[in-house]
Every structure is written in structure tokens, then in C-alpha cells.
Image (spheres, helix red, strand yellow):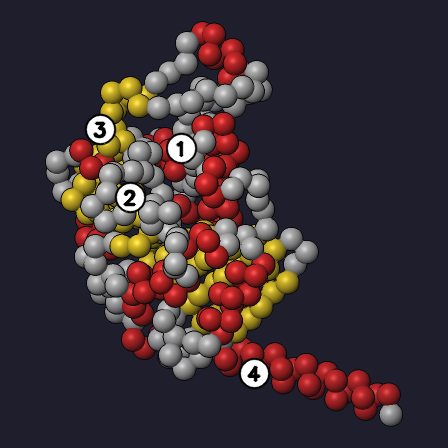
Amino acid sequence: MQLRYLLLSAMAIYIFLWVSQLAGFRTSYHPKDTHFDFSSPLAAPLRDNDKPTVLVLTLVRNHEGWGKNRSFLDFIQLVQSLDYPPSNLHLGVLVSDPQEYDTLSKIVHQWDSQPFFPKVRILLRGKDVGIAREDRKQDHVQRERRRLIARLRNYLLYSTLQDEEAVLWIDSDVTHIPSDVLGRMVDSGKDIITTAATYGPGGGFLDLNAWSGERIQPNEEQMKVVEAGGVFVPGPSRVQFTHELSQEFGELDSVGGMVLFVRAEVHREGVAFTTNYVIGTGWHHEGYDGIETEGLCYVAKFLGYKCWGMPHAIAVHSTD
């Protein structure tokens, strides 16, 4: 009798797993992270073989991370507004809040018959340095804040990138991207590209991490503070920001991550988001500049890759 129950239980588990695979869903649990996968066989025949497959990636802390009065569904609409074959777009989202992770997973779970993307991976990574959203621009929190963002970006990248040919990073609280931007990025053949960005429609330009030129360097006394683990606030000396360039594509020394295109080959060769200030670093101390997206181009140039800005392509950031 016990053997019969064991066999029935094993069959039930097998059937459950088989049905789950047919539906395209898989949820994995681990003490430190969780992920939810969705894939749709319906989209495979629709793929445009003349266009590269692009992996769209974003980080979001919690429901507030999408911007004021916005949600995951608004982000989906933003991606869908791009003039690019939807069957060639895959999606990866890393969430830090368990409740928002559950919300996103439930939304994606309902795509069985009409998927928005052929492949989706939602990851829960509960790392947080406890910085409130309204304090995220304060100078004294930038090192730990951007270190965490770099770690999460890299974790998301390494956990999602498969056979895609390019990666498009979009900040979760971006509200508008010109519809032709992705197509122009792909067709350019360039390695790493970012757009200009404004704070709200018609607002001031932001994302000042994207620049070409020279940055402020610490003097001798300031460098001693850096070597002792103290704070030095890096900033522009003589630079041009993306929106100040004149060409369709202008070369940059650093990029921001608000809307950032990277050929997948570049990422695969080790060009990722630096988790410490790499400029001025030593064996026993961190440097004073070049963290996260700003370190991306620094690493890339030693491998022969270049970074570019699109001054006439203007993304819009949420105003909250």
C-alpha cells in the first residue's frame, strides 16, 4: 500500500512539472534569491531573422521604483512603444522587494495565450543599503548606492543573458523613449550607446554620468582622504555631456544607464559595471572616480570598444 502511494505521489509530481513546462513557467527558489521564468513557443515562428534579438533589462527596488503613478505595466508599454519587432525582444527584471516580485510574477503568469515577450525572467535579489528614494542623490551615499546598483546590474546581466545579440538597459522610471532609438542603435554597429535624457517632458537635462573630456582630480590632501576610505566627490572639469554633442553619434568617455545599449559580445568579454571607483585605485584602497556605468567605458576602451552618445535622441525620466 505504501509503495502504491509513493508511486502515485511521484506520478503527480511528474505531471505537475510536465504541465508547468508546457505552459512555459518555471519558478526556482534559493535561500538568497528567487527567479521566475516565462517562455512562449508561440513567438518563435514570428522572430524577424533580419534583426538581432535584444535583451531589455531593468532594475526596480519596489513599486515606487517605476515612478509616480506608474507600474510594471507602464514599463511594458514603454518597451512596446519601440519600433522594433516584439518577437525579437526578451525581458529581464531584477526586483528587491518580495511583494513587488510577486506582483510582477503574477502579471507575467497571465501571459499564457498572449505573451508580450517571448522570454521573460523576473529575479528577486533582496540586497539593499537602506537609502530612501528621496535621498538617493546625496553625495555621501553615492559610493555605496552605486556600488549596489553595479552589483545588481551585473547579477541581472549574468543571470539573464543567453543567446541575445544586444542588451538594452532602461531605468525603471523612464517614461518615454523615441520609438526609433533601438533600431538606430542596432543599425549603427556601435558597441555602447546612450541617449540624452530630461527630467520630465521639456525639463532640464540629466544623466550627467555621460560625458567626454576631463574630470576633477583630488589634490594630495584629498587623495590621502580617499586612501583612508573617506569621501571625495567627483565631478566635471572640462566636459561635454551627451546633449551638448552635435553629431548623430558623439564619442564619450563615460555613459549613464538611463537608456544604454551594449552589444552582447562586449558584455560577454567582461565589460560590466565596476563595483568600485576604478580611477585612482590601489591594491589596498579604492579610487575616487569611475564607478558603475562610468567604469563601463573605462574597461571597454582597453578591449578596443568605444562609447557613444545620441544627443538628438532624448529619453524622459519621471519627475518624482
Residue positioned 25% across, 28% down in the render: 212
Which quadrant is the N terminus positioned in? Answer: bottom right
User: From the viewer's perspective, is the residue at label 2 or at label 4 nearer?
Assistant: 2
Front-lying residue, 51 or 177: 177
Kindly tell me whether residue 266 is visible in this rendering. no
Q: Earlier in the sequence, mark 3 or mark 1?
A: 3
Q: Which residue lies under the disc numbered 2?
A: 199
Q: Residue 189 location in percent, x, y?
A: 22, 48
| Badge 4 amino acid | Val
Q: Earlier in the sequence, mark 2 or mark 4?
A: 4
Disc assigned to residue 19 = 4
Residue positioned 50% across, 61% down in the render: 122
Q: Earlier in the sequence, mark 2 or mark 1?
A: 2
User: From the viewer's perspective, is the residue at label 2 or at label 1 nearer?
Assistant: 2
Q: Which residue lies under the disc numbered 1?
A: 295
Q: Residue 70 location in percent, x, y?
A: 39, 59
